[in-house]
């Protein structure tokens, strides 16, 4: 117990990558800055970095929180378009009062509903934004009014998803792989098609699973809840399914690097971590990140249970990972975080501080464990 407590304490020590200041994800992106001519015209290289008037569609949680800080730090004028239901800015763990004051004083807010297409057109046309980062767009119909409102737009940078790829026996997924028009992310596919069909300079980023502080999806949090409660961790199948996670700060860095980059013009990039991991390996990595003992893993056959609408495991029960070679080759981007280091960063700045998005729910776990006990 003493050794475990000591390990847990050591993992909670501050580190250069455990902060929200943006220092850990800052790169010499200004050296790569280019000046786009509107609507896919031939690009001219600018000798110096240009400050851009940037609109971020959704920027008050997770990806947008880290991206907007990077953009402000590099001297861009950033406007967040949100419905105004959440605070526009908030001071984050590890962020000094001075850093937060500087950031919050420079961010502007445009309140509205992106489903109100007339409002979107009129309000955006009046602002003449140079660049749009669309973090929360799900359907092409939501994107078209933005393009219509900004005829001189220099770049549209879109957050898509690796979930658009057609399930395949040949992995990892690459950017030119077949896509699934019936995917639950088909709206993102249709958006990419729209951007391609319009005279727009666009870039699309396809993350795999995203993790990190403030994650609103139950990825690492799902494991941390069970580890903290000292419970076994139910894992479907044999636990050797291979998946991939990318840290949100590395994702923000990738979004930053494509800004004004000619190599990103009308291109798609997979963005995630450098290595893949099995489900069992992920459970153990979460335990190591939080300073918990080696977890007890319980494997089960999902077909033996009727969970109703509840989700018993936070990942799709299959091999699912993508190549990031194109991004590293073309953009010079590389992920900073290895998996355990990234999970430690997430734990230290979020769950380890007692904060999480969803309360623990062990209903499906109890169904699985109850049946396992009954068959012993």
Image: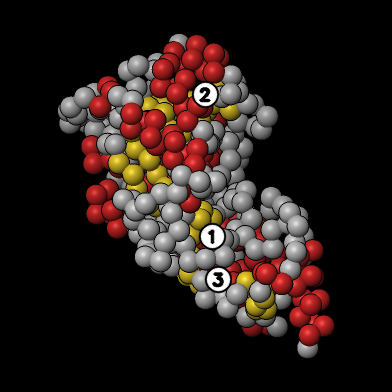
Report whether residue 221 is seen: yes
- Where residue 167 appears, as percent x and y from the top left, is 45, 58
Q: CA distance from mark 2 to mark 3?
A: 41 Å
Report whether residue 77 is seen: no
Q: Quadrant of the C terminus?
A: bottom right
Name the disc covering residue 279, or none. Answer: 3
- Mark 2, secondary structure of its residue: strand
Q: Which residue lies at the image location 45% right of the left edge and 23% below the top edge? A: 144
Closer-to-camera residue (240/309): 309
Q: CA distance from mark 1 to mark 3?
A: 20 Å
- Mark 3, secondary structure of its residue: helix
Mark 2 or mark 3, which has the lower sequence index?
2
Tell me the crowding category of disc 1: few under 14, some 14 to 19, or many 20 or more residues within 10 angstroms, Cα based: many
Name the disc covering residue 302, or none. Answer: none
Q: Which residue lies at the image location 56% right of the left edge and 61% below the top edge? A: 316
Give the residue pinned by disc 2: 108
Q: Which residue lies at the image location 23% right of the left edge and 37% below the top edge? A: 262
Name the disc covering residue 345, or none. Answer: 1
Query: Which quadrant would residue 322 be assigned to in this image?
Result: bottom left
Mark 1 or mark 2, which has the lower sequence index?
2
Query: Image check: 213 left or right of 362?
Result: left
- Where residue 57 appears, as percent x and y from the top left, is 51, 30
Q: CA distance from mark 1 to mark 2?
A: 29 Å
Closer-to-camera residue (258/352): 258
Pair 1/3: label in front: 3
Query: Which quadrant would residue 113 be assigned to in this image?
Result: top right
Pair 2/3: label in front: 3
Relative to 346, residue 28 above or below: above
């Amino acid at each position: 117990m003493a050794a475990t407590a000591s390990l847990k304490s050591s993992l909670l020590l501050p580190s250069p990558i455990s902060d929200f200041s943006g220092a850990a994800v800052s790169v010499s992106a200004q050296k790569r800055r280019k000046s786009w001519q509107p609507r896919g015209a031939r690009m001219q290289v600018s000798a110096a970095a240009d400050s851009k008037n940037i609109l971020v569609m959704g920027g008050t949680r997770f990806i947008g929180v880290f991206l907007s800080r990077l953009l402000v730090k590099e001297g861009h004028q950033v406007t967040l378009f949100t419905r105004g239901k959440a605070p526009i800015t908030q001071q984050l763990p590890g962020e000094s009062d001075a850093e937060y004051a500087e950031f919050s004083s420079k961010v502007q807010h445009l309140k509205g509903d992106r489903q109100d297409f007339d409002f979107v057109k009129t309000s955006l046309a009046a602002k003449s934004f140079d660049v749009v980062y669309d973090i929360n767009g799900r359907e092409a119909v939501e994107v078209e009014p933005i393009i219509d409102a900004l005829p001189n737009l220099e770049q549209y940078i879109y957050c898509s998803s690796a979930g658009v790829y057609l399930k395949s026996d040949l992995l990892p997924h690459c950017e030119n792989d077949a896509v699934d028009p019936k995917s639950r992310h088909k709206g993102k596919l249709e958006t990419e098609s729209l951007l391609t069909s319009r005279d727009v300079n666009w870039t699309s980023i396809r993350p795999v699973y995203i993790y990190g502080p403030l994650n609103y999806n139950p990825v690492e949090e799902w494991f941390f809840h069970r580890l903290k409660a000292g419970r076994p961790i139910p894992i479907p199948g044999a636990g050797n399914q291979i998946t991939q996670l990318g840290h949100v700060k590395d994702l923000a860095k990738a979004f930053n690097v494509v800004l004004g980059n000619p190599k990103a013009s009308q291109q798609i990039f997979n963005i995630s971590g450098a290595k893949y991991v099995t489900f069992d390996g992920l459970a153990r990595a979460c335990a190591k990140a939080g300073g918990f003992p080696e977890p007890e893993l319980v494997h089960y056959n999902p077909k033996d249970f009727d969970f109703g609408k509840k989700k018993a495991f936070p990942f799709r029960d299959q091999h699912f990972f993508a190549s990031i070679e194109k991004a590293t080759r073309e953009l010079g981007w590389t992920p900073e975080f290895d998996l355990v280091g990234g999970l430690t960063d997430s734990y230290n700045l979020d769950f380890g501080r007692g904060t999480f998005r969803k309360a623990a729910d062990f209903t499906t776990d109890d169904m699985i464990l109850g049946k396992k006990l009954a068959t012993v």
